Amino acid sequence: MTTSAELGLPALTVAPGGVATTTLTVRNDLDIVEAYTFEVVGDCAGWTKVEPARVSLYPGTSETVTVRLAPPRSPATRAGEFPLGIRVLPVERPDLVTVPEATVTVTPFQELQAALAPRRRRGWLRGRYRASVRNLGNAPTGVTFTPGQAGEDLRFRVTPEKLRLEPGESGEVRVQARTRKLIWFGKQATWPFEVTVGPEERADGKDDKGGKDAKDGKDGAKAPEAAPETAPTPVQKPLLDGEFLQLPIFPKWLLALLAALIALLLAWFALVRPAVRSSAKQAAEKAVAQQNATPAPPAGVPAGDTPGSPANGSTPGGQTKPGAGKPTTGPGSQGGPGPGGLAVPGTGQQSSATIDVVTENGAAATGSYQVPHGKVFDITDLVVANFQGDQGLVTITAGNKTITTIALETFRNQDYHWVTPLQVPEDQAVTASVTCEVPGTPASGKQAPTCHELLNVSGTLSDIRQGN
């Protein structure tokens, strides 16, 4: 006396996102009425159900239930062969439990999710991008990136050339687009391009689907299937759109400015300079003529006095002229109070400060120099160094004013100079704020782990006048 159970198929094949069914026949060989419950065991338990979940049988009778397999279409459902067991548990006689087994083959599928950042870059010669991809399939796969353009204006380089991703794993490559020639003058040019992301092709010309062929058994014989074979779904290859905006070395307005400067120089040499030289010559000749016409003073008369005039500022009768022989004070005279202002004249000293900003990849950092209390800083020169060739953004402020905001990839060294200094009051700061997108590659040839920028500020540091 026992309980017997048998699955309808010893082997099944099911695709993620699809459904496969088979039957389970249970026979009651006991001499009592028995109820049976079913429990799925093995790797397929999460997406396998038995319908109905409980049956009752009279002695000597049997009943067939349906086993439904519905694996989800996700990276968690790995491709391959997995055991399927159905535990048939008698309610009255649990010691007579039986577990029929079968083999389930989950077929592989491929799905890729990709993105390109940033979509647009500006530059004189090249633009750098980041292409990211995630394997949403259920089998390991090799991924390749194929940039292309309608014409032959751009050349591309992908580093690394391909990736190997497990199900659910993400990866990233660097894509560089480089023009074949510079634009010296004229308008900017726009070069659109595409990057095709797809599975790596095998030597036989087929896509790398990962995993084993689900249709064949271990001995090469064809295993039974729950459904007829269907044609494989073509793999969708993501297509990423990008754009490189090439800037001219010398913008169009610079040509107009150069032409205007040349015209001014020609006008100076042709018209203004001869007139100035002629006026200066006439003034000199007039001064010489006046000097020759002035008679020399008689002998014995002190210089600066004329015959008959009282000496030492005295009037006839021995009275002294008001204010004669006394020092006078006034604006600009030594010992006078002088006009009020922020800086005390004569106290300014040349000073410079270097701001060193190190920023983690994908983060932002700030460096600053604070003007000491009781001082005022007049900025005349400012130099920004991006010696690694980092990518990102730097914003420079002086006090509460923003001086400039620059994309790091557009320069290696940038300098600014002012004829009228930028004045930073006491207790305020000169600040460099850096947002790091991609660390650059210094002269060593190895990409740096962090962004690194230097800002040198030069000028005059003076004391502040207190009161008037």
Image: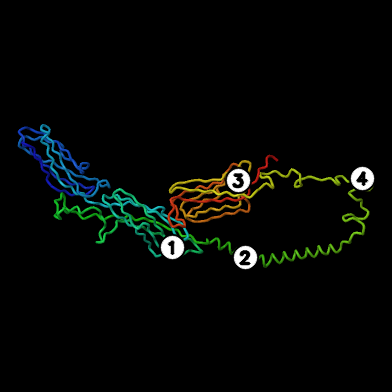
Ranked by sequence position, the earlier of labels 1 and 4 is 1
Residue linked to disc 3 = 424
Judged from the image, the secondary structure of the residue bearing numbered disc 1 is: strand
Query: Which label sits on residue 263?
Result: 2
Q: Residues within 10 Å of mark 4 (few under 14, many from 20)?
A: few
Q: How crowded is mark 2: few (under 14 residues within 10 Å), some or many (20 or more)?
A: few
Residue linked to disc 4 = 319
Q: Is residue 424 above or below residue 89?
A: below
Judged from the image, the secondary structure of the residue bearing numbered disc 2 is: helix
Ranked by sequence position, the earlier of labels 3 and 2 is 2
Depth-wise, is mark 1 or mark 3 nearer the camera?
3
Q: In this view, does 162 lie above or below 91?
A: below
Residue closest to the eye, 114 or 301? 301
Q: How many labels does the image show?
A: 4
Q: Are marks 4 and 2 in contact (CB under 8 Å)?
A: no
Q: How crowded is mark 3: few (under 14 residues within 10 Å), some or many (20 or more)?
A: many
Disc 1 to disc 4, C-alpha distance: 92 Å
Farthest-out residue, bottom: 270
Kindly identify the amino acid type of the residue bearing the numbered disc 4: Gln
Kindly identify the amino acid type of the residue bearing the numbered disc 3: Val
Q: Are marks 4 and 3 in contact (CB under 8 Å)?
A: no
What residue is shown at x 14% (from left), y 42% (from top)? 66
- In the picture, the quarter occupied by the N terminus is top left
Kindly identify the amino acid type of the residue bearing the numbered disc 2: Ala
* 249 relative position to 65: left or right: right
What x and y, as percent, mark residue 81?
A: 19, 49
Ranked by sequence position, the earlier of labels 4 and 2 is 2
* 153 relative position to 264: left or right: left
Residue linked to disc 1 = 179
Q: Residues within 10 Å of mark 1 (few under 14, many from 20)?
A: some
Kindly identify the amino acid type of the residue bearing the numbered disc 1: Thr
Disc 4 to disc 3, C-alpha distance: 57 Å
